Image (cartoon, rainbow, N blue to C red):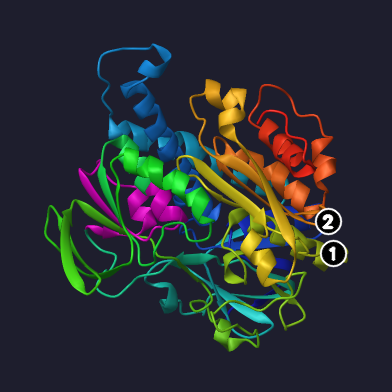
Amino acid sequence: MADVEKKDTVIVGGGPGGYVAAIRASELGQKVTLIEKGDPGLGGVCLNIGCVPSKALIAAGHRFQETLDSSTYGVSKTKATIDFKKTQDWKQKKVVDRMTRGVKMLLRKHKVEIIDGVAMMDNDHQLRVLKAGPKQFMDFDGGKKITWNNLILATGSRPVEIPNFKFEGRVIDSTGGLNLPEIPKEFVVIGGGYIGTELAGAYADLGSHVTIIEGTDTILGGFDKDMVKVVVKNLKKKGIDIITGAMAKSSTQDDSSVTVTYEVDGKEHSIKADYCMVSVGRKPNTDNFGLDMTSVKLDKHGKVIVDKQGKTNVDHIYAVGDMVPGPALAHKAFFEGKTAAGAIAGKNTANDWVGVPAVCFADPELAQVGMTASDAKDKGIEVATAQFPFAGNARAVSLDQPEGFVRFIYTKKEKNIVGAQVVGPEASTLAGELSLIVNCGMNVEDVSLTIHPHPTLCEPVQEAADVAMGLPTHI
């Protein structure tokens, strides 16, 4: 029988929440052991098979489109072609592999012990580490047994599989969508959320004809309709067909194609494509590593219930990232990992944000933080809104990207900003300033009096505050 090893702080999962927690815990004087099963590996879904490689494909698509037609700027050339194998090679080796090497280097720098294997919980005080792969449960010694002073769970999430669309062959999840061997001529995307919309736009830019099948009445349902309208306009300009109010029913495939059957208003329709990507949401990984052998409580969605420091109902066990309530976002997991590590060290840390910024890398990009106007109304808060269009911003116009706007939601009486939204160029970058504004509870006058450099895309932030003050300059 294997001996039991006693560890200080043990972290299960090397994704955004896990590896950041490991670094912070080490910085705060803890001896850290990180257990990573290797699929997808250090950096987790986001870095290996999610948000980072998807942004690389989006960037490649934009470059290809610029090469095809930059006549707006007076630039002309012979027609461009794309070597997709080289694109995929660049995405993997120059982006993903470089960043994962960086994570490994940082963990080594902070003297984090890394154990390769699958963690399986035995009880509230012990886990085992088994070899990854199909023979993991055939270890005669039962695996490496570990107890701890404190445990942080950061096991992430996985794509939801819907009936009649098993992930195999030409029916793929978002990971498969990022690693296609060729650019499909016809590409069907089931689910018009963040992932579906982003990759639909990327493949349309790369030359695919894309069809989005969405069950609700709009894509990107988490954003206000006037924001989504700007994105939909551009998606249609790319030739993307958007079918809303549609229910995906079944799929059949052969060696070269897949046929998707869907229903709209009681009538069935079919569409044939090279690939069908299903991106209808993610499921927390709380059901596949023996958590039911512990006393840790889950909510009705299968997520771990935690307090503001990430502590579960079991005093020495914490949980962070996609496996706890809240949006499944890497930057949220980063914050939660630091909070849990700080709590273990006795620091007065807390996940007490007003709002977590949400970003979609569509074309144009969308971002929002805090409350929408409808959120405020539901809470009985009397608010007003003020927005400034990118069409009035010199930098956006010079980039030939004048669509969209920045908007503040603020209390009518005090003019305190409770929410902020942006659709337009570099919305993802502007989200950082907007998050600071909302989470610090700034007043519109605070923002109005903050000098923003000219000519830049951040000026509409100040201009929207000027509008709220009743003193607009450029509109």
Residue 347 percent coordinates (x, y): 87, 63
* Quadrant the N terminus occupies: bottom right
Can see residue 357? no
Q: Is residue 347 left or right of residue 229?
A: right
The foreground one among 63 and 145 is: 63
Label 1 Cα crowd, 10 Å radius (few <14 / some 14-19 / many 20+): some
Q: Which residue is mark 2?
A: 28
Q: What type is the residue that disc 2 sits on?
A: Leu
Q: Is residue 441 visible?
A: yes
Give whichever of 412, 291 is nearer the camera. 412
- Residue 466: which quarter of the image? top right
What whole-number distance in Å separates the C-alpha atoms at marks 1 and 2?
7 Å
Q: Is residue 394 above or below residue 346?
A: above
Helix, strand or loop at mark 2: loop
Q: Which of the two discs, 1 and 2, labels the residue nearer the N terminus? A: 2
The residue that label 1 is drawn on is: 345
Above or below: residue 440 compared with residue 102:
below
State which quarter of the image contains the C terminus: top right
Which residues make up the magenta segment?
A: 170-199
Mark 2 burial class by Cα count in 10 Å: few <14, some 14-19, many 20+: some
Measured as percent of width and height from the top left, residue 83 is found at 28, 29
Give percent across and percent down for residue 459.
Answer: 69, 31
